[in-house]
Image: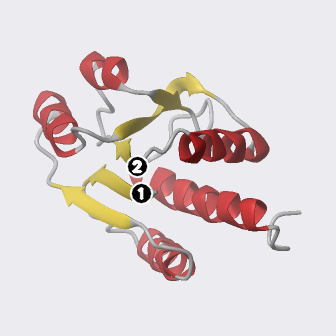
Amino acid sequence: MKWTIHVIGKPALDYARAGVAEYEKRLSRHGGVELVTHRESGQAENSRRLLESSDGALRLVLDERGTMLSTAEFASRVAAWELDRVKRVAVLIGGADGHDESVRQSADLVLALSRLTLQHELALVVFLEQLYRVGTVRRGEPYHR
């Protein structure tokens, strides 16, 4: 299964760049992840771009109004997607104004990383870490305890 993360804005903060680089490196050993950044252009245009660029993929939208899952529950979802022969997963991370309703409505899963509103760079790092953690759970590696 190919994972593509579509995010509005490139990580500008040092901690975010370092975190993204670290988890991209870790994930590269297990199939990798593609990170696609889109320029901030306002909520409506951001939403249009995210929907257009994720067409044909299973859409996982990160939004604080979404479903909260444990790591084990997320790992089970990923396993189910693989059993359903999902080829592509597009993860959509909005900009400063978040997603408009059209993005949430188009989602196969709206996932909340927290009930707190997270700055999009932090959400990206947290999601990458969880994606790596899910991979280690599924491979039986000791990272996840």
What is the crowding at mark 1: few (fewer than 14 residues within 10 Å), some, or many (at least 20)? some
Which residue lies most toward the right here? 145
Does residue 40 appear left or right of residue 133 in this picture? left
The residue shown at (45%, 44%) is 86
Contact (CB < 8 A) between labels 1 and 2?
Answer: no
**Image height of 40 relative to 145, above or below:** above
- What quarter of the picture does the C terminus occupy? bottom right
* Mark linked to residue 83: none
Q: Answer with the quarter of the image where residue 134 lies.
A: bottom right
For disc 2, the marked residue is 120
Local SS, label 2: helix
- The residue type indicated by label 1 comes to Trp
- In the rendered structure, which disc, 1 or 2, sits on the residue that comes first in sequence? 1
C-alpha distance separating marks 1 and 2: 18 Å
Q: Is 31 or 64 nearer to us in this picture?
A: 31
Label tally: 2
What is the crowding at mark 2: few (fewer than 14 residues within 10 Å), some, or many (at least 20)? many
- Whole-percent x, y for residue 60 in the image: 44, 37
- Whole-percent x, y for residue 28 in the image: 49, 79
The residue shown at (30%, 51%) is 6
Q: Of circles 1 and 2, which is in front?
A: 1
- Whole-percent x, y for residue 67 in the image: 60, 25
Does residue 91 appear left or right of residue 112 in this picture? left
**Image height of 99 relative to 134, above or below:** above
- Whole-percent x, y for residue 72 in the image: 78, 45
Q: Is 143 or 99 nearer to us in this picture?
A: 143
For disc 1, the marked residue is 3
- The residue type indicated by label 2 comes to His
The residue shown at (41%, 74%) is 17
Local SS, label 1: strand
Q: Answer with the quarter of the image where residue 13 lies.
A: bottom left
